[in-house]
Image (cartoon, grey):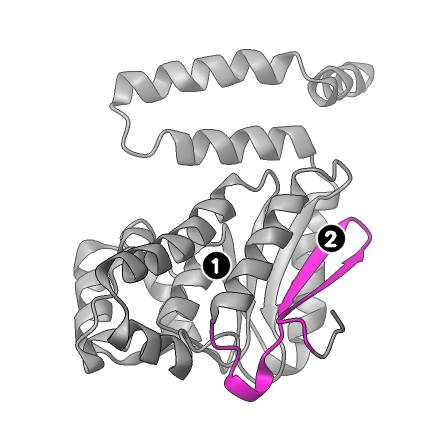
Amino acid sequence: MTDQTKTVLESKADDILCLTLNRPEKKNALNDAMIAELKNALRQTNRDDSLRAVIITGAGADFCSGADLSALKKISTASIVENANDARSLMDLFMLLRQVKVPVIAAVRGRALAGGCGLASACDLVLASTSARFGYPEVQIGFVPAMVMAILRRNVSEKRTFALLTRGGEIGAAEAQQVGLVNEVFADDEFDDRVKAYVEVFKKVSRSAVTLTKELLYGTDGMAFAEALQSGADVNVIARLTSDCQKGIARFLKK
């Protein structure tokens, strides 16, 4: 498969993996091939112990406009079983993003809409260019933004979630940051450099500590307070025994 036919391009530099959605002529709309290639790439990341972070971005002007027309046509004629399998495939992608051991960062230019907005918000961190746009237009065609709701609800307040999912409009990067959907907004003409600098931080901190932190953060979601504290205590013990922690303590004591 050539770069021209691949829907997800992979490039690695300095222990940072970049996955580029590669359907610019379709505004990087999601189809079966792209979802499959993205899942395969994410599954491979946990086999690379040198990896420090993953960036997901889009080729061309937009990040991802959601499902493409062929996918929508398939939905309209598919059986219940076929629709269920299709939904599970996207669900698996969202789950995989949390199972990747290192941080996954969405670098959003242009529009991130519907499933594309869900893909961005399912990442651990979201960086946006000033001109980026976010939205959930599904209700305009009678569709329910169902799976992305679980992600959005964990990012922003209940009231904000309801408005974003039911009004079918778009918001800009500044508002997305204000409501908690975006971590940082960078000027369009500085975006690539600012994203690189932001991600570089993960090369300077403990990989094992970041991995354990990510697992604990998502693992305690929905736990009762006492159970979450116990999980924290367990991870605390594990962290103390890691090579990174042992070396870090040794460096600190030498100061």
At x 74%, y 41%, the residue is 204
Residue 162 picture quarter: bottom left
Mark nearer the viewer, 2 or 1: 2
Please say if 194 is above or below 142.
above
Q: Quadrant of the C terminus?
A: top right
Residue 17 picture quarter: bottom right
- Where residue 39 appears, x then y in whole percent? 55, 53
Q: Which residue is mark 2?
A: 16
Q: Secondary structure at mark 2?
A: strand
Is 38 placed left or right of 90 in the picture?
right
Q: Can see residue 180? A: no
Stretch in magenta:
5-30
3D distance between C-alphas at marks 2 and 1: 19 Å
Mark sitting earlier along the chain (2/1): 2
Q: Which amino acid type is shown beneath numbered disc 2?
A: Ile
Is 170 placed left or right of 33 in the picture?
left
Residue 5 picture quarter: bottom right
Q: Which amino acid type is shown beneath numbered disc 1?
A: Asn
Q: Secondary structure at mark 1?
A: loop
At x 74%, y 18%, the residue is 243
Please say if 213 is above or below 76.
above
Of residues 168 and 247, the one nearer the viewer is 168
Q: Can see residue 144? A: yes
